[in-house]
Amino acid sequence: MRAMVVRRYGAPQVFEARQVPDPQPKPGEALVRVKTIGINFADLLQRMGLYPGTPKPPFVPGIEIAGVVEKVVEGGKAAEGEPVRVGDAVSAFTQFNAYAEWAAVPMQRVYRLPGGMPFDDAAAIPVNYMTAFHSMFVMGNLQQGDRILIHGAAGGVGIAAVQLARARGLVIYGTAGPSKQDFLRKIGVDHPIDHEKSNFVEVVRKYAPDGIEMAMDAIGGKSFAESHLCLGPTGRLVVYGFSIAAGPDGKKSWIRGLKAMMQTPRFHPLKLMSENVAVIGVNLGRLQSRGALLRGELDELFRMYGAGKIKPVIGKTFPLAEAAAAHQFIHDRKNIGKVILTIK
Ligand SMILES: NC(=O)c1ccc[n+]([C@@H]2O[C@H](COP(=O)([O-])OP(=O)(O)OC[C@H]3O[C@@H](n4cnc5c(N)ncnc54)[C@H](OP(=O)(O)O)[C@@H]3O)[C@@H](O)[C@H]2O)c1
């Protein structure tokens, strides 16, 4: 089959189109003919060699696909939730090996799509919306009227968080680059913040002098400390990424990484107690042992999709062979919404 292989860790040019052996599904796995691949920031970090657990090159990156089940091999670990059948349209979480025509995926990580969902949407919902939903309503227990700060509010997780916040009646502060401010207004961010022009702590504290209930931060480094400054009593800081580690060139930089680590705050438990503040870590990739919880979250998201309460914004689609250009597009921070690879 055709696959996009990372030849060595590095900038997007390290991608190479290769023929690789077809995956052979094991007992308990489904073989999926891949139609669309959701690009996640994690894929960029995998390519750079910065994502924990990434194999040594050459390897095929990626974690999120949508397609059609072509074969099911019974046995293995019992599937949680509905079993899938040949011909079902599904989305699935792979562990690497997503940028290819076929994927063999354990049944626990395969989700049947609601009727009529296009494959583009099916590759754009699971990672982004589950990350936001899990952070905001499972770990964060946000309630109507609460105030939330969302960084990267025009990105994949960011837009998901904004839509979920709107559906739940939250007050939204959202940061993004200058060219994305109109878009933030359009999707209903109450307080759009251009992070190049304004200090987001000052903006939040101006409109919410008592502090807000949640800050979702995947930027990392000193941003974690500044997001913490936005919180009031009962505030929750959700730490779910470290985008700052990836520079515009897409290459690993020890200096950049070290600087970001040194600027990362340490939170003393007694200080958190006296402030009535929580720091919450979220990592969807490390939640596999909570398969039933994740499946329930995705079921709820599919219901919200069916009711028209959420709808992914597809920023741009690229053919599989143009994975390098797709990654560069995200490094250049040009994307508004999700970037998808398609296989014809
Ligand atoms: N923990 C989890 O389970 C989990 C799951 C999914 C995603 N994540 C994390 O969430 C973050 C967002 O992921 P995503 O897939 O939504 O990404 P995305 O669509 O590319 O959006 C990220 C946004 O972050 C901003 N940004 C800040 N620093 C950046 C940098 N160095 N390079 C590129 N963009 C940067 C950009 O917006 P502006 O240019 O407008 O500032 C960009 O649009 C990433 O850190 C990712 O690793 C974590």
Image (cartoon, rainbow, N blue to C red):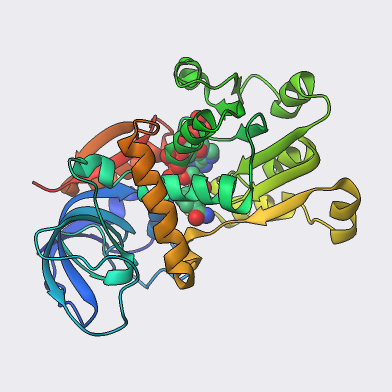
Examine the rendering and report whether any part of residue 134 can be seen.
Answer: yes
Q: Is residue 44 visible?
A: no
The relative height of residue 218 versus residue 203 in the rendered view (above or below) is below
User: In which quadrant is the N terminus drawn?
Assistant: bottom left
Residue drawn at x 34%, y 34% is 307
Q: Residue at x 42, y 39 (%)?
A: 156
Position of residue 64 measured from the top left corner of the image (x, y, whole percent): 31, 55
Q: Is residue 25 left or right of residue 59?
A: left
Task: Indicate the position of residue 158 as horizontal and vertical percent values.
Answer: 49, 36
| Residue at 35% in and 71% down | 80
Q: Position of residue 58 (x, y in %)?
A: 28, 69
| Most foreground residue, 170 or 231 | 170
Res. 10 image quadrant: bottom left
Residue 180, relative to residue 6: is it above or below?
A: above
Query: x and y percent of residue 114 in the render?
Result: 24, 47
Task: Left or right? Give the position of 119 relative to 286.
Answer: left
